[in-house]
Amino acid sequence: MMNKNNPHDSEKTEKPDFFNMDRRTFLKAACLLGASAFLGTYRTELVSALEMAETKIVWLHGAECTGCTESLLNGGDPDVIAALSALNTKLAYHETLLAGQGIFVDDKPANNAELNSEILVDELITEGNYILVVEGAIPNGPNGSGRFFVVGDRTFKELFAKAAGNASAILAVGTCAAYGGINSASSAIAQLTDYRGVAFKGADSSGGMLRELGINKPVINIPGCPAHPDWILLTLSAVVLGKIKVPSDLPSVLDRYGRPRAYFDEDVHDECPRHEYYERDEFDTEIGGHKCLLKLGCKGKHANADCSIRKWNGGASMCVQAGSPCIACVEPGFPDSSRPFYQPGSGSSLEGDSHSSDSDEGDSYEKYSRDKSSDYRKIRRDD
Amino acid sequence: MVKVTVDPLTRIEGHLRLSTEVNSEGIVTDAQSSALLFRGFERILQNQDPRDAALLTQRICGVCPTSHSLAAAGALDQLFGVAESVPKDALVARNINQALNTIASHATHIYVLWGPDLANPAYRDVLTPLGETGSALWKELLGRFAPISYKLDGVPVPVGSSYLAAIPEKKRLQEAIAVIGGKMPHQVTSYPGGYTYKPTIADIGKLSSYYLQVMDFVSKYTLRVSFEDWIENTYKASSPQKAVSFVLEHLQGLVDKTAGSNNFTREVGWGDAEFYAAFGSELVGETLLGLPASLKHDRNGGYSDPSKIAFLAYGAFYKPENGDGYDPNSPAGDRFQTSGIVTGNLEYQNFDASKITESVAHSFYEGSGDLHPSKGETNPVGDPAEIRYDRGPDSRYTWSKAPRYDGIPCEVGPLARLLAMKEPLVTGLALAFAENGYSAANTYTRMMARIQETAIIANELLKWVTVDYDPNGKIAVHTDLSMAKDSQGMGLWEAPRGALGHWVSTDSNSKVISYQPVVPSTWNFSPRDSSGTPGPVEQALIGTKISAVENALGVDYANPVNILHVGRSYDPCIACAVHTIDLTGKNTPATLKLV
């Protein structure tokens, strides 16, 4: 079967002029090339970006595992530091990477912005004109207070409100920031903690923290557990270079869950490295094999992401290639929509509705697959 | 008395607050450690398929996901009754995955999270008045370790050379994990009874290639003496004294060769490890090597009362020579890094998991009893007004619980592991400090242990990859859900930052009744317990002089660099530390018995 996404088959990736490209072609080309080739091939053009004003990034950490920052550091070749430099973009605030920390002497902020990260972040927010990146979910509980996460003597909810209010664009990186992710998984305490994504709670676009705070700002979601570094860096590139204009272009470049279609239109199943076994009805039923993982619970059919084409960690591998079923970690209902991970025909729908987890491997799963595949096809781009 | 509070302590995983009281001499007289975030993680596993635990729990931490998934796999091995039959090659594949994650995590900590503190302007202020030697030292500190987006007095500082060179290596190590683990962070191959992927002969070639590239970085930046010589004369030394002597002689050679010209560059032999080994310590650098200055990191982060601290390791890395299967109880000597307890006076004891209790007396949970983690009853406060961090050490002030071993707070991590396994160099350093009136554990020994552990695991990794792993071997034994009915499991393992245990129990439908991780940063950053004994980092902060080089230029409350060093020396992972929750009290009491 012809791989329509193979860059070698696509004439559009041959010597494209990035700076004169329309938005759609840009996204496609950037998507096909990957961050590595993009930033490497277009180094010369990107140098002219240095003439643009410096773009600042304020990166906030909510309830997270730092996995998305770790993933960012796995960014292509050139690495993330070179990439940011090529884009004349400064990571102005990022608490895992920068020098400063919050310092208080007798409860008053001490020192200056070079050493005190709390002073720095407040100064940056006041200056405005930055892209806000959020990693991690935001607790609203208990009772709407946000006090399940207090940092620098203020709730994270409060810091987020301040930073979001003055941001020129907002990226929610990782499934936690986009939809709540694992923090919002069904449990006896989920209502109490009341974790929110930036613009969504699960698939509910009215349940995000922005709406709760009464802030109306457009958001680009880059989900994934973690988010792929190409998705992060290429989306940032597109915003910095003005290839995606915020907010005017967003309705056409994002899907209904706020994800750039360039990366989240494909599903993992279609280009899966084990796809030929699926075609031949050859399935693994024990771990450690090399056949299709459908009967070990693979949710690749319901996962809208280009992992099978892009792969992970410099193309080294991907989940299903390593014998583990796709758990559709880019979907708004993750993890509830995918678990039990190792059982086929189970899990709730993408919308996070409850779905029987007792179904057997047979008919119900096939029916479920058909339902879901028709569902996702509705949001595929129409070219 | 001045209140000096670091909130948040950045360049760590997660969110941590260190509150201190500092006297007029600049010495910490009281300290509290507060984990600032509540996630309620393990509740999402209740009533679920236990097999999901290996993938779900690694989402606790994106820095050490492999460790969580392998601790979970260990608990599940026992839960499914297959711990004794996991194939040897699956165990070796787990070892390789864990080794790569540990090395990547240590490298990230050393260069990206901890190193930037060496470029703190306080060192410029102390060192540059000391003439050419001091200026040369400051030049090295700033030139090697400055982080990104760094400014001093408004002037942008270029990214440090070691920092910059370490980022691609960290990336390379994660690529290596992806080769045999699918992707990273959150690799996917841990599974009860084995490993989901059977690495091929081509993968072994790739891993060897990655290894050589990383070692190329090590030889250029970290350790300028031959790696083989270092391993042979430290880790494989016949006694702790011989290991320390080798290092001292090596460093003395560098001093003799370069001190006259004040040339402390890598080019003349001062790798980052050698540089820190000499200049990080007053005892090693000034007393033993006769250097004119040091950072005196051995003077901070120590424990003043050895009866109130111990060092704890659960043990990690299966021994391939033991063949298939392993003992989930991790008895002494059973793993490459053994389990064990080392007391504050450096006496050795065998580890007994039944002696672990957790106190919530000073945590944001109701109740006050000291319970085994498998029987924890932890109900979080639900009143927002109760969640406050400014009410002093007698209050509830953190989301972390206070684990204790036989009632004693324990430090976990590389230092504890290397003491438990009697690694010659770190044991020798600890003894030398103890004999010379220092605390055996201090910021310097913690960092030296992390560096040395990276070396010995890298050395062992090559053996696992090229000698022990058989690509034609068996990678998994059969498991199915029916094997997990009414069962229980304990996964004792090590994260890069310390001892990590997962406990699980299931009902007659093989659904999870309770799932409890007890993680390293809960040990290291624990609050006071029900008897008021402070946790390890709280003890380590008390008595520390807050400003650079033992307050050499007086007390600067606004730049408490030693508080930062002490806190970060434990490699905190606070997302891990904030774990246990039972809001409703409806958790079925676990029936897990520990042996």
Image (spheres, coloured by chain):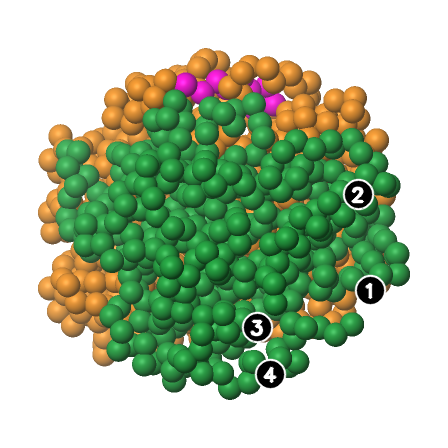
Chain colours: A green, B orange
Residue extending farthest front: A382
Measuring 59% from the left and 61% from the top, which residue is drawn there?
Answer: A381
- Neighbourhood count class around disc 1 (C-alpha, 10 Å): few under 14, some 14–19, many 20 upward: some
Q: Position of residue A222 (x, y in %)?
A: 49, 54
Q: Position of residue A182 (x, y in %)?
A: 54, 39
Q: Find out whether the residues at labels 2 and 3 contact each other: C-beta distance under 8 Å.
A: no
Q: According to the image, label 1 marks what residue? A: A276
Q: Which residues are magenta?
A: B373-382
Reading the chain from its start, which is encountered first: label 2 or label 4? 4
- Same chain under badges 3 and 4? The reply is yes
Q: Secondary structure at mark 3?
A: helix
Separation of disc 2 and disc 3 at Cα? 33 Å
Tell me the amino acid under the disc marked 1. Glu
Measuring 74% from the left and 72% from the top, which residue is drawn there?
Answer: B202
B425 or B452, which lies in front? B452
Tell me the amino acid under the disc marked 4. Glu
A362 or B555, which lies in front? A362
Q: Position of residue B34 (x, y in %)?
A: 35, 32
Q: Secondary structure at mark 2?
A: helix
Q: Find out whether the residues at labels 4 and 1 contact each other: C-beta distance under 8 Å.
A: no
Q: Position of residue B1 (x, y in %)?
A: 13, 30
Q: According to the image, label 2 marks what residue? A: A367
Q: Chain of mark 3?
A: A
Q: Is residue B327 left or right of residue A7?
A: right
